[in-house]
Image (cartoon, helix red, strand yellow):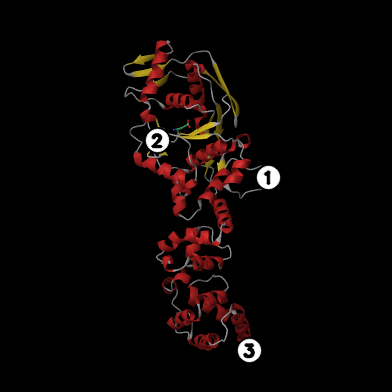
């Protein structure tokens, strides 16, 4: 085994970057960073029918968003692009012809086919799954190059992993059955076999293969739903691995420090959105108020608000009022929409539920409230309690109508805090819209 750690993520560009792929990429990246090694990105685009440049682009974007930077690849204007199998056809053909020359492979028209040696026991020690053995007699001959001149997966992956000097092949458990075929090819080519570490499957809560039925499957959808990449990173790291203690919330740097392939579990991991929400909420809570506000800006815009007309400090203050409520940036934006505009409140609430008697009481209360000399949450609360005691009514009989008129919601931060933050004039104007002053 080579002493430097070199790992790779080898997606086929036949779909977006899905949870399973991102998980595999993440574990490779962690292992490379843990060991000060290299993380190689290789696009396996030999399936001409299903591969598209657009899928490749979204996979790269998804990796960048998750912060899974790769270390090398052909120069593309100062940056390095990924390796692409479609650009390496000469290399595959060259090695296939060597196998033909040595009598280990044969041609059928344009195709090149490997003769599987009989009577051999192929074995390897998987870092995660332990010793795995397979009798070569159970295998059919392996197509190396198809008649269209393109290599097959099992062959190209061997040539690439060898020529790219990959030390550890870390990939999904669904590839365990391919590994003996690949080992036979390494042996036939006289190449050293890398270390294999297969990762457990990720299933939905119903223990079925993860699919659209379980919710968003592409990592980019999670960005659009208001998740922070550090939270997704943290959550993916917990699928099939844990730091060995109670820790569940950690930064990238902490994950790099703690990660060990030897601690990966065999048991299928369950993708649990509630857990992801919990992790996301914890990351939002750890972030600085200004950063939290910046991340929420696109979501305020999405619900039709104009956060750009406010200062970042003001937006950060608004979010501070939530005191940790809200599990995604989208929720933060929704839960605070009424601070940025009265429009959503009007859409949600009409005040039709208030009868004349109650309205009279409320008018009297609100006019007293609006004429208070000081406009501070404590003053408002003391005044409200005193006023209610005197009239023999419950505080909530005035606080709830106030909450509805200011926020259009049943639940909000302390309503006197909301009133003070909105300012006396805005409160008066909202109450007057509902005929409550
Ligand atoms: N292109 C293969 C896949 O997406 C790569 C498998 C491997 O890592 O060897 O499943």
Asked whether the beta carbons under mark 3 and mark 1 sit within 8 Å of each other, the answer is: no
Q: Earlier in the sequence, mark 3 or mark 2?
A: 2
User: Which label belongs to residue 100?
Assistant: none
Asked whether the beta carbons under mark 3 and mark 2 sit within 8 Å of each other, the answer is: no
Judge from the rendering whether residue 112 lies leftward or rightward of residue 378; answer left or right: left
Q: Quadrant of residue 324?
A: bottom right
The x, y position of residue 118, in whole percent, is 50, 13
Q: CA distance from mark 3 to mark 1?
A: 56 Å
Q: Residue at x 63, y 89 (%)?
A: 390
The x, y position of residue 269, in whole percent, is 57, 41
| Circle 1 residue | 245
Q: Looking at the picture, does residue 255 appear above or below residue 225?
A: above
Q: CA distance from mark 3 to mark 2?
A: 78 Å
For the residues carrying marks 3 and 2, which lies nearer the camera in this image? 2
Q: Residue at x 35, y 42 (%)?
A: 54
Residue 209 shows up from this direction: no
| Circle 3 residue | 390
Q: CA distance from mark 1 to mark 2?
A: 42 Å
The x, y position of residue 15, in whole percent, is 40, 40
| Circle 2 residue | 75
């Amino acid at each position: 085994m080579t002493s430097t750690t070199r790992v790779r993520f080898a997606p086929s560009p036949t779909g977006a970057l899905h949870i399973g792929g991102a998980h595999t990429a993440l574990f490779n990246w962690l292992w490379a960073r843990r060991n000060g090694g290299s993380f190689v990105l290789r696009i396996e685009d030999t399936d001409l029918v299903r591969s598209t440049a657009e899928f490749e682009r979204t996979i790269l974007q998804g990796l960048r968003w998750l912060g899974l930077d790769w270390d090398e690849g052909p120069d593309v204007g100062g940056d390095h692009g990924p390796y692409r199998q479609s650009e390496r056809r000469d290399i595959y053909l060259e090695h296939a012809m060597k196998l033909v020359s040595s009598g280990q492979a044969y041609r059928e028209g344009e195709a090149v086919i490997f003769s599987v040696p009989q009577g051999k026991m192929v074995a390897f020690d998987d870092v995660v799954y332990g010793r795995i053995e397979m009798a070569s007699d159970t295998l059919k001959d392996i197509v190396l190059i198809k008649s269209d001149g393109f290599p097959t997966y099992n062959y190209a992956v061997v040539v690439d992993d060898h020529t790219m000097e990959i030390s550890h092949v870390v990939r999904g458990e669904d590839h365990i059955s391919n590994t003996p075929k690949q080992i036979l090819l390494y042996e036939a080519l006289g190449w050293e076999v890398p270390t294999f570490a297969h990762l457990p499957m990720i299933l939905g809560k119903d223990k079925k293969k993860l699919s659209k039925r379980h919710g968003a499957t592409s990592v980019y959808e999670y960005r659009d739903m208001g998740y922070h990449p550090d939270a997704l990173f943290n959550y993916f790291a917990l699928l099939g691995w844990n730091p060995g203690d109670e820790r569940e919330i950690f930064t990238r740097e902490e994950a790099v420090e703690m990660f060990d392939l030897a601690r990966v579990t065999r048991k299928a991991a369950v993708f649990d959105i509630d857990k992801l929400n919990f992790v996301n909420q914890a990351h939002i809570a750890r972030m600085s108020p200004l950063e939290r506000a910046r991340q929420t800006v696109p979501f305020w815009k999405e619900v039709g608000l104009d956060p750009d007309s406010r200062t970042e400090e003001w937006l950060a203050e608004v979010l501070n009022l939530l005191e940790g409520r809200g599990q995604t940036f989208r929720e933060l934006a929704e839960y605070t929409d009424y601070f940025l505009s009265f429009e959503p409140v009007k859409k949600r609430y009409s005040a039709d539920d208030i009868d004349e008697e109650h309205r009279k009481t409320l008018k009297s209360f609100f006019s007293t409230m609006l004429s208070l000399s000081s406009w501070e949450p404590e003053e408002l609360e003391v005044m409200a309690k005193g006023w209610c005691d005197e009239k023999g009514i419950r505080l909530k009989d005035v606080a709830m109508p106030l909450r509805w008129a200011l926020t259009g919601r049943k639940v909000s931060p302390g309503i006197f805090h909301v009133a003070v933050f909105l300012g006396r004039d805005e409160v008066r104007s909202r109450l007057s819209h509902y005929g409550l002053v």
